[in-house]
Image: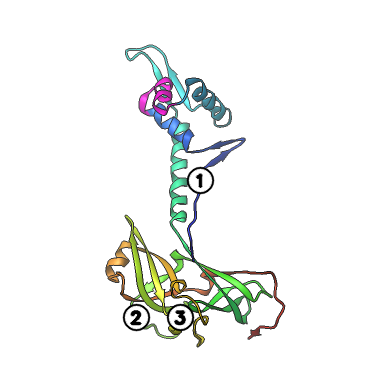
Amino acid sequence: MTIERGYRTELSVGEVTVDRRDVEMLEAIDAHGSMHAAADVLGRSYARLQRRIVELEDELGPLTERNRGGADGGGTTITETARDLRRRFERHQTALEGVASVTETVLSGTVVEREGELATVETEIGRVVAVAPANSNTVQVSVRSDAVVLSDPGERSRPGQTSFRNRFEGTVERVEQGTAVAQVRVDVDGAQARTGIDGAGLEGARADEATLEALVTRTSVDSLCLEPGRPIVASFKATAARAIPLGGVDDSPVDSN
């Protein structure tokens, strides 16, 4: 199962919350040089727009400057404080969009071994080593797509050269390309999944459940020739896989080293 995040960009300043409508208001004032024109373009009443400016200025200081008379008949411009607010908002939105584009693969399973904070979990794609709470045997493991690394099956790493505890061979099922990155779904063969411990996937797991999501750059798509049907290896660190308990705490014994 894949879960996608959704976020609403907001900035909290004292008692005021700045959202996209506020930034659009400042942009319209800046573009049209008038609060009346901005209100018309945005389809808002002048009184409401002016009231919102006052609310924001009570917390942030002057956001607009009135220019009276002159050859152009005056108007309203925004201050450097308003421009800085717009830049901060855009940076925050860009950061959140990056997080929102990261999906998660969620795997259900049973803890079969423990090694300190790490647990080996039998899942539908095979055995996964993950960070797991103590005394929890039935868990749900989540792996962020930006933590999954794809590589050619022919590239064999020497022992001790990699910190990836989870390594799965599979086939590219789907590639969704964006401007700079691509979402890749890998169909994992549970019978060949390797985590350093021999073992097959959960008996009876559905084929469409045995998948992993990876977020890679367009450069990686080209260099690895990623396309449906392409054999691939998906790897991720044990610390990138996080388990949460399902159905409460289970005190039944689990093998530990």
The answer to whether residue 245 is above or below residue 29 is below
Question: Which residue is pictured at 35% across the width and 72% down the height?
Answer: 172
Disc 1: CA contacts within 10 A as few (<14), some (14-19) or many (>=20)? few
At label 2, the amino acid type is Pro
At label 3, the amino acid type is Gly
What range of the chain is rendered magenta?
31-43
Q: Which SS does the magenta portion mostly show?
A: helix
Badge 1 marks a residue whose secondary structure is loop
Question: Which residue is pictured at 63% across the width and 69% down the height?
Answer: 246
Real-space CA distance between mark 3 and mark 1, rounded to the nearest whole angstrom: 37 Å
Real-space CA distance between mark 2 and mark 3, rounded to the nearest whole angstrom: 16 Å
Residue hosting label 1: 8
Nearer mark to the viewer, of 3 and 1: 3
Badge 3 marks a residue whose secondary structure is helix
The answer to whether residue 158 is above or below residue 97 is below
The answer to whether residue 67 is above or below residue 79 is above
Badge 2 marks a residue whose secondary structure is loop
Question: Which residue is pictured at 42% across the width and 20% down the height?
Answer: 36
Q: Earlier in the sequence, mark 2 or mark 3?
A: 2
Residue hosting label 3: 190
